Image (spheres, coloured by chain):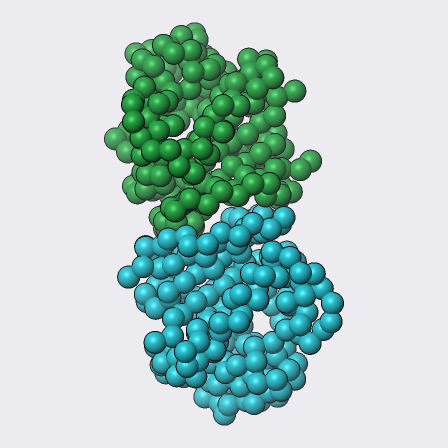
Chain colours: A cyan, B green
Amino acid sequence: MSSVTCQISISLDGFVAGPNQSFENPIGEGGMRLHQWVFGTESWRRQQGLDGGERNADSDVIDDHVAGIGAYIMGRKMFGGGDGPWDETWTGWWGEDPPFHTPVFVLTHHSREPLQMQGGTIFNFVTDGIESALEQARSAAGDKVVSIAGGASAVRQYLAAGLLDELYLHIVPVILGAGERLLEDVGDPNMQPVSVTASPTVTHVKYRILR
Amino acid sequence: MSSVTCQISISLDGFVAGPNQSFENPIGEGGMRLHQWVFGTESWRRQQGLDGGERNADSDVIDDHVAGIGAYIMGRKMFGGGDGPWDETWTGWWGEDPPFHTPVFVLTHHSREPLQMQGGTIFNFVTDGIESALEQARSAAGDKVVSIAGGASAVRQYLAAGLLDELYLHIVPVILGAGERLLEDVGDPNMQPVSVTASPTVTHVKYRILR
């Protein structure tokens, strides 16, 4: 059965998004500071269909992680388009060729037909809960891994339910002071660091979650 | 001039002590889980005057850090003995031969004569603020480092005042869920990871704080 992983950038004070998230600023004030380490890498640029970028410890971390992923699960807020019934013109934040290139299962209370995008991304909308989404994602992932893409609430739900096998934190040395915390109301999981990669700006720690 | 460092164990959700700290439970409920990695080491046992213990990545981290320290600063709560004027029978939590072996400057609102302990520890009580305590500690440390021993409030004050040069976090993969946070109300310091040491249980990350 596919294991379930999550990789996410987190501030040193525990936030994965800044305060006052909005349509204009989906990861909140200061939230982009958590992701600066990504944008210069060859790995990220390639995912976006761009040339160039650096090969370094950070790009290796991204590549190693992404290579194993066969399906993603994300929360409605991460997919975007506001609350309530769908505005069907909204197809996500990522344009015609999203950087997932696999099936993506979006947790929502409002049903919607699947959206086939360019580059292999298919957004599927799941209205019957996180376990159903996981079952569908596992089926789609085959022998690859299911990744909980975010946001924080989706990750917290899978972690609290004991359904996450691995949490890969990119610990970014900024202090946001406010925003959305990742590790709140998730119980007391038994976690073990299994790999640590230091780059000049970020510390990547992969935790196995023991049952 | 002596640089100013702090090493402290922190939970993955950002707490350096559990909830409901008390005389019986000075680092709060669950707080001892942050320090389990220390007790088996040869380094810690030696500091306490005990034989045996393990040599491993964790013990090296402790030794490297402690070797450079010429003086400590700690908050009144860490020294203990309750609030208000001193009960002069209270000489700290650590017995006759405390594990500091250097001058220690205790931040307090209540003056008290210095306490000369066995093994080189002298507790000095400073009533005129954190900058004065730092000046006295620097003078005592000579060409060695001043360490802010804790608790969280003392560390926060030095960090917020821009007086900390280095923060060495021992990131322990437990989720306490409540307690005392370290990195709250400390502003937005410019931090850079300068060394990362992985042990089987703890990730040790040393941050330089840039001015």
Q: Residue furthest left?
A: B24
Q: How many marks?
A: 0
On the image, the x and y values in percent for residue A90 come to 60, 84
Above or below, comparing residue B152 to residue A71 in the picture: above
Of residue A79 and residue A198, the one placed in the foreground of this image is A198
Image quarter in which the C terminus of chain A is found: bottom left
Q: Residue at x 50, y 92 (%)?
A: A113
On the image, the x and y values in percent for residue A25 come to 64, 66
Q: Residue furthest right?
A: A52
Quadrant in the picture for residue B56: top left
Quadrant in the picture for residue B113: top left
On the image, the x and y values in percent for residue B187 come to 60, 42
Of residue B82 and residue A202, the one placed in the foreground of this image is A202
Relative side of A189 to B210, left or right: left
Image quarter in which the N terminus of chain A is found: bottom left
Q: Is residue B123 visible?
A: no
Relative side of B89 to B14, left or right: left
Above or below, comparing residue A121 to residue B136 in the picture: below
Above or below, comparing residue A185 to residue B13 in the picture: below
Q: Residue at x 60, y 17 (%)?
A: B143
Q: Residue furthest bottom?
A: A113
On the image, the x and y values in percent for residue A152 come to 48, 64
Q: Residue furthest front?
A: B55
Of residue A185 and residue A158, the one placed in the foreground of this image is A158
Q: Is residue A49 visible?
A: yes
Quadrant in the picture for residue A5: bottom left
Relative side of B189 to A206, left or right: right
Q: Residue at x 40, y 8 (%)?
A: B116
Q: Residue at x 56, y 49 (%)?
A: A198
Of residue B181 and residue A95, the one placed in the foreground of this image is A95
